[in-house]
Image (cartoon, rainbow, N blue to C red):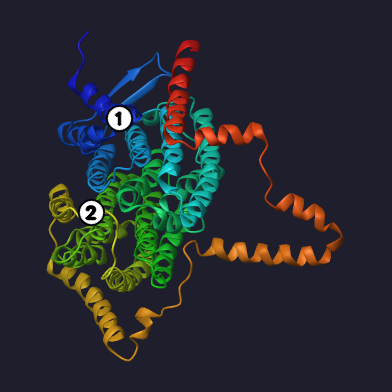
Amino acid sequence: MIVHHEILLIFASVGWPLLLTAVSLNEKHLAFTHKLHITAAIPALLTSLLLVSDYEFSMSWLILGTTLGIDETSRIFLLFSSILWIAGNTLLPMNKSGSIAGWYLVTMSASFLVIFAQDIPTFYMAYAAMSLALFGLIINGSEQSRRAAKIYIVFTMIGEMLLFAALIMIAHNTNTLDIDNITDRVPQDILIILLLAGFGIKAGLPLVHITLPPVYQALSLAAAIPVAGSLLHLGLYGWLRFLPLGQVTLPYWSFIILGFGLFAMFYGALVGLTQNKAKSLLAYSSISQMGMMLLLLGIGFSAPSKWHVIQTSLLLFALHHALSKGALFYGLSTQGIHKLALVLPALSLAGLPFTSGALAKSALKDQLIFLPELWVSLINWLLPLASIGTTLLMARFLYLCRNSHHSQTPKGLYWWLLLMCSLLIPWYWSLQTINIISIWSGFWPVLAGAVIAYVVYKGSYQSLFSRTPSIPPGDILILGEKVLKQSHLSSKTEHNTHQEESDFILGPQKAPAFIAVPERYLAKWTNAISLFLMVLIGLFLFLTDIL
């Protein structure tokens, strides 16, 4: 039997991180495997660079018929994802148990499988495994991380249920499990709602974005780099795979998504300006930038015949944002003269001419011609204001991180390599030129934002920079908690006669032995991750045998 090199590359991309994880289970090999961790994402990077044409292969004996492959869309996502996982690996600490590296590698492997998956069951299984494994990266023993992990796992479970329902509906409506063959779907409103909300929890869609800020704040920099740059965009990847884009005109959904995009652009910037921590600020920056990507999705619903061109602009924007955001997170680990270079990805995110951000925003503006004239005028008027907001956001970010110190050892060479990737790869991929008019339209909002930031910092309003009232990461979740707490307190006052029952239900109780014993066993990461891998392997073998 001839095994093609494409198959070997795809299997190595998913399997090599898992193999390193399995070796890491033996604590005697931790020092050795830690040196190899930086190679975990290299097969995926090679795959994105070497497989320049579309390729897929099927394994009919696995689950319901597993199909893996790579195409134009998945190639771009695999490219920036692998770069960011490698960058994060350079900051990955070696702890005695190896738990951080274990969850890191499992999350990495599952995220690559999401990108390669060409059938619904494989996609969903990989997406769920990635989401659950990320929980192990968030929780690290601190009170902040435990709270963030609780918020994350609750909303992740909600998202998984929404996606499961949506994917079952798609499979039922189209009578196929092959993602590429989902062409005769019925664009049901409930299906679009489920997909937008389910993937939106990961992508930072407004109203379901509340996991991002506390999670970003709780993550180590090594984990935050791929989570903010790669996993965030896998929510967008899910939309591209399953929404009926390029198939049917849905003007009302175009209107709704464009509205969400404009709201996210300004909401993320305004709330981000109130943050007192650099990582939570970058979370709100991601929400704002995702708003611009939502604009392109909205345009796609308005002009399905032009979707291929619109999708190219969207992929360029995702590539730019992922690498720039990863560089901003990595820059938090740098010191001295290296930290001065943080201004470059910050200006790129703001859209300064001749940066990848200017390239991405120019591509966005080029697609506005496919919208009604009213939307074109409105968005053209609001985009410069959004650029001013992003510039102010980046100015506050630079202010917050000027004296920041993180436990990760700075890696100067890797920092400059990632920086060059973020600045140059989008240009190499698009080979687009910018005219003089677009240079000025991109320059003046950044200049205006920089002037405002300078006046505020140096003038009589300097206290705004250091004493800005902070909205806690999670914003509307915190508000909801306060409302529920007040409701609970008033209810408790009115029902004093039921005090004992209330305390029994709401107060902490000692767990029974049948819960406490397994919990203590699974508290050791090697036991937890071994069981996790055994369940996945067992599920594969079980379904393979019965089907």
Q: Can residue 504 be seen?
A: yes
Point 21% across, 39% down: residue: 38
Q: Secondary structure at mark 2?
A: loop
Q: CA distance from mark 2 to mark 1?
A: 24 Å
Residue at the spot of label 2 = 409
* Extreme residue in the right direction: 497
**Quarter placement of the N terminus:** top left
Q: In the rendering, at what x and y percent does residue 341 appear? A: 16, 64
The local secondary structure at tag 1 comes to: helix
Residue receiving disc 1: 28
The answer to whether residue 183 is visible is no
Q: Position of residue 360 (x, y in %)?
A: 24, 57
Q: Is residue 132 left or right of residue 81?
A: right
Determine whether 26 is above or below 194 in the image: above
Q: Quick one: 304 or 490, which is closer to the camera?
A: 490
Specify the quadrant of the image occupied by residue 321.
bottom left
Q: Within the image, what quadrant is residue 485 found in?
A: bottom right
Q: Are marks 2 and 1 in contact (CB under 8 Å)?
A: no
20 to 463, vertically: above or below: above
Total labels: the figure holds 2
Amino acid carrying label 1: it is: Lys
Q: Residues within 10 Å of mark 2 (few under 14, many from 20)?
A: few
